[in-house]
Image (cartoon, grey):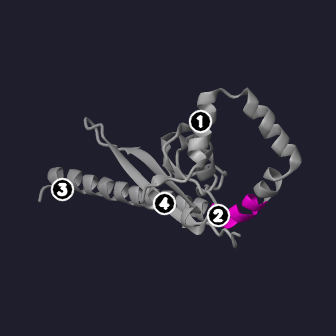
Amino acid sequence: MEAAVALPLLLCFGLALTWLLLTARIESLLREAVDEAVTTTAAHAYPVDLAARVYHNSEQIQYIENQVQRLLPHSIKAMFQESRQPSDTQEEPASRKWSESSIHRTWAKPFVMSFVDRDADGEPLLDPDRLVVVSALLPSFASEETSYFGLTVEYRLTLPIPFFARDVVFRAAAIERCWVGEKL
């Protein structure tokens, strides 16, 4: 085989192999960060639930809730009452609580980025601008069936091929049951 043909083929093969190793690294970094974030949150969720219950049952918090509730419009009060009522549908509890709200994206993206591995300079190995939190599952702590925490995250990587602008989307999802203790 002539060098004019073999050298470009060998170079393309080397670049393709390097890109495949890069994608495998990105996928494992993303999966590890999401798994670690969800596992850590599920492990520490019960003490937060206990603290919230103690504060929620205090007289000062009840007074503040009553004062704020008087100022809310009727439509917002009705929305809160609907969200507190149990659903009559027979759906799987974990599947109906996934939220794609932008509010969850605001806190979840920096939260997941805090679990991404870092290089020697302390910079994350994943670019935060390419990371998108797609959905979040928040626990209600009412029972074991509704006490799940989960995240779905996407990471976009542009193919480094000239004249071929295309993105590869890596998706990682994790869900973990939070320990809720004994509910009376």
Horizontal side, residue 101 vs residue 80: left or right: left
- Check disc 3 and give the amino acid type: Ala
The residue carrying mark 4 is 93
Residue at point 48%, 43% (across, down): 100
Ranked by sequence position, the earlier of labels 2 and 1 is 2
Q: CA distance from mark 2 to mark 4?
A: 22 Å
Question: For numbered disc 2, what is the local secondary structure?
Answer: helix
Along the viewing direction, whichever of 178 and 132 lies nearer the viewer: 178
Mark seen at residue 78: 1
Magenta span of residues: 41-50
Mark nearer the viewer, 4 or 3: 4
Residue found farthest to the right: 60
Question: Of helix, strand and loop, which mostly describes the magenta segment?
Answer: helix
CB of mark 3 within 8 Å of CB of mark 2?
Answer: no
Residue 32 seen in render: no
Q: Amino acid at mark 4?
A: Pro
Quadrant of res 18: bottom left
How many residues crowd mark 1 within 10 Å: few (<14), some (14–19), many (20+)? Answer: few
Q: CA distance from mark 1 to mark 4?
A: 22 Å
Which residue has dot 2 on it? Answer: 40
Instruction: Say which residue label 3 marks.
Output: 6
